[in-house]
Image (tube, rainbow, N blue to C red):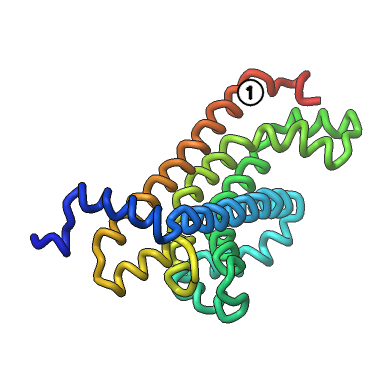
């Protein structure tokens, strides 16, 4: 294949150095990382909160579940233009889109975890008159960690895809914008550099979640007992 379609590894490395020195590559990376981090945290917190609410208030879950399912099944590439129209070209629409794709797997895992808290622990919390916050922190959240972390692990890879979709639709900085710029200029090496960096970011996020999962679940299995929970 001609080099302009499939550049050699040394040409890709040279383009990486060139972009770093003259095209603010580090700024593009920081923008995308900031969007992913903010959207991931926001979507994760909302997912845990709504998962807990849906278990504590089943009627709320029955009312909102169809709307949440509709939002989840809608193609994200179709949602992105609307978010751009509503929120502009800054980080807002990208963070919102990332939060949307993060929310559903975390919410589903949290709801399953909170619903699976064993009855003896719930009875003990009632017997000891534990408040809502203490019951959540000492009993419900520890028991729900495995499915919550599994949802976060799934969402970590989807968050990178959502960030790229948002930046492809409209942005002035970010790795998705760099992808679009390389495509418009017919520069395959720029596209390959952006894809490789995005893959590394996705892999890094996934491994961070796996590390947290190993540590937190180790604590979960060794420390969450009937006495320690209260």
Vertical order, 63 against 49 (above or below) = below
Vertical order, 137 against 26 (above or below) = above
> Viewer-proximal residue, 200 or 136?
200
Instruction: Left or right? Give the position of 191 relative to 177.
Output: left
SS for callout 1: helix
Judged from this view, the residue extending furthest toward the bottom is: 85
Mark 1: few, some, or many residues within 10 Å (few <14, many ≥20)? few
Instruction: Left or right? Give the position of 187 relative to 28.
Output: left
Q: Is residue 107 visible?
A: no
Q: Residue at x 66, y 33 (%)?
A: 143
Image spot of residue 154 (x, y percent): 48, 47
Judged from this view, the residue extending furthest toward the right is: 129
Q: Residue at x 76, y 50 (%)?
A: 56
Q: Is residue 168 visible?
A: yes
Locate the N terminus by quadrant: bottom left
> Viewer-proximal residue, 144 or 86?
86
Q: Residue at x 58, y 23 (%)?
A: 218
**Number of numbered markers:** 1
Judged from this view, the residue extending furthest toward the left is: 1
Image spot of residue 196 (x, y percent): 33, 50
Image spot of residue 206 (x, y percent): 46, 41
Residue under label 1: 219
Q: Residue at x 81, y 25 (%)?
A: 230
Image spot of residue 180 (x, y percent): 36, 69
> Viewer-proximal residue, 63 or 159?
159
């Amino acid at each position: 294949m001609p080099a302009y379609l499939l550049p050699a590894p040394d040409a890709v490395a040279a383009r990486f150095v060139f972009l770093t020195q003259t095209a603010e590559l580090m700024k593009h990376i920081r923008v995308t990382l900031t969007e992913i981090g903010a959207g991931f945290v926001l979507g994760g917190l909302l997912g845990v909160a709504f998962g807990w609410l849906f278990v504590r208030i089943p009627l709320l879950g029955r009312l909102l579940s169809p709307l949440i399912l509709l939002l989840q099944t809608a193609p994200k590439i179709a949602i992105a233009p609307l978010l751009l129209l509503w929120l502009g070209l800054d980080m807002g629409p990208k963070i919102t889109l990332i939060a949307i794709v993060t929310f559903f797997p975390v919410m589903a895992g949290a709801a399953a975890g909170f619903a699976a808290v064993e009855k003896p622990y719930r009875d003990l919390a009632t017997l000891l008159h534990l408040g809502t916050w203490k019951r959540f922190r000492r009993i419900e959240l520890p028991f729900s960690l495995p499915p919550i972390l599994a949802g976060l692990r799934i969402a970590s890879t989807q968050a990178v895809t959502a960030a790229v979709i948002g930046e492809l639709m409209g942005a002035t900085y970010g790795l998705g914008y760099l992808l679009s710029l390389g495509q418009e200029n017919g520069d395959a090496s720029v596209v390959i550099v952006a894809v490789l960096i995005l893959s590394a970011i996705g892999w890094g996020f996934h491994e961070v979640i796996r590390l947290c999962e190993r540590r937190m679940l180790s604590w979960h299995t060794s420390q969450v007992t009937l006495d320690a929970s209260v």
